[in-house]
Image (spheres, rainbow, N blue to C red):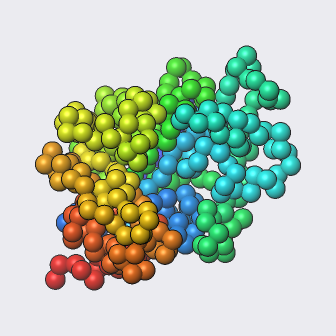
Amino acid sequence: MWVGAFFIVFLAAVAGSSCGAARLYRFPLSNRVAIQDWRPFNVAHRGSNGEIPEETALAYKRAIEEGADFIEADITATKDCVLICFHDPILDDVTDIAAHPEFRGRRATYEFEGQNLTGFFVGMFIPLYLIISLLCIVDFTFEELQRLRLRQRYSFRDPSFNGKLQIITFERFISIALEASRTVGIYPEIKSPVFMNKHVQWPQGKRVEDSFMEILQKYGYKGKYKSDEWNKQPIFIQSFAPTSLMYISNITDSPKIFLIDDYTVRTQDTNQSYAEITSNRYLDFISNYVVGIGPWKDTIVPPNITTGYLMNATHLVSRAHSRHLQVHPYTFRNENQFLHFDFHEDPYEEFEYWIKTVKVDGLFTDFPGSLHRYQEWNSKE
């Protein structure tokens, strides 16, 4: 509970509440400016990762400076059950793992969401009797991951911070939002829960969802959408796995967002195609558990891959809105490689189209500063 404008709350990690080292974080003053909710939410996708390597403390702080309403993170786990902010199941693409000879023997192949994937896996454990043609168990502790440094995913983005930043914990991510001078929401994704629950040895029969929720509860995240509790510490919890969202619905009333991939992809838990789970019948069902959906934007307005222009929009947004579901599509990026010809190489034209024509309720963007500028230019007088 917040008491007085200058009261600072300190929380230490509760022994046994989660794996990993205990930490102490400073909470902000109680009289912070509230989050804006009269215009679509500006969601900083993995932080301001258009400028700074994704899922790093600096990327999240930069996003807050640039005006993001929410900072978004992918939450996965290490071998020793520490929840961290990291998107990929392997370390190859965005870290300097190849420069660490001590980890050279950790490379392996696993089945990941229906496909064989080879690389250095973040955090998993496989019993020896299940290992075939592998020399050792392939996993990483949080301490081992701290030796690595991150880099930009795309070669055409600013490399200035490559090799300088570390992987951070879920708790560090939370602290960045809570220590902001204004109210900043968090938008964590329970990343690949089926995979994590299969390959990480959770204590006392827990699941990744249990550890995830323990941390959120420890830092006071609770309350239905737009409740007093939510307004103080805004949060959306997201996942591509519907059963994961249903599971945590029995633990928390915090608002949840069901992520939607390309229609041809199948869910990792129920093996349904996303075409099936965007049917009216399924939207009716999932609306009992979530406050919105987070579709890949091409499922809302598909592009013509031959011409590079957009085709006619589907009815997904209107069907969601008719069920009082918000729609937060992903991912908006400024570079020409990601802009359809309709927008004349101008990301602000893309924002204009999606906000004013498609009428979405939030946008995941790699460039929260650009979206904030657009929204300020078009704010209410």
Residue at 15% across / 45% down in the picture?
323
Q: Nearer the viewer, residue 14 or 242?
A: 242
Residue extending furthest front?
306
Residue 376 coordinates in the image, percent (x, y): 29, 79
Q: Position of residue 53 (x, y in %)?
A: 59, 64
Q: Quadrant of residue 213?
A: top left
Depth check, front residue: 169 or 52? 52
Please name the residue shown 43% across and 80% down the image. Answer: 345
Q: How many marks can you see? A: 0
Residue drawn at 40 percent across, 28 percent down? 270
Q: Quadrant of residue 110?
A: top right
Left/right of residue 82 with respect to residue 306 in the rendered view: right
Q: x and y percent of residue 193 in the render?
A: 49, 34
340 shown above or below 294: below
Report the front residue among 329 and 378: 329
Q: Quadrant of residue 144?
A: top right
* Residue shown at 19% from the left, 39% from the top: 280
Q: Is residue 115 visible?
A: yes
Q: Position of residue 242 (x, y in %)?
A: 36, 34
Say which quadrant the C terminus sits in.
Answer: bottom left
**Residue in the foreground of this view, choosing between 87 and 72:** 87
The residue sitting at the left extreme is 322
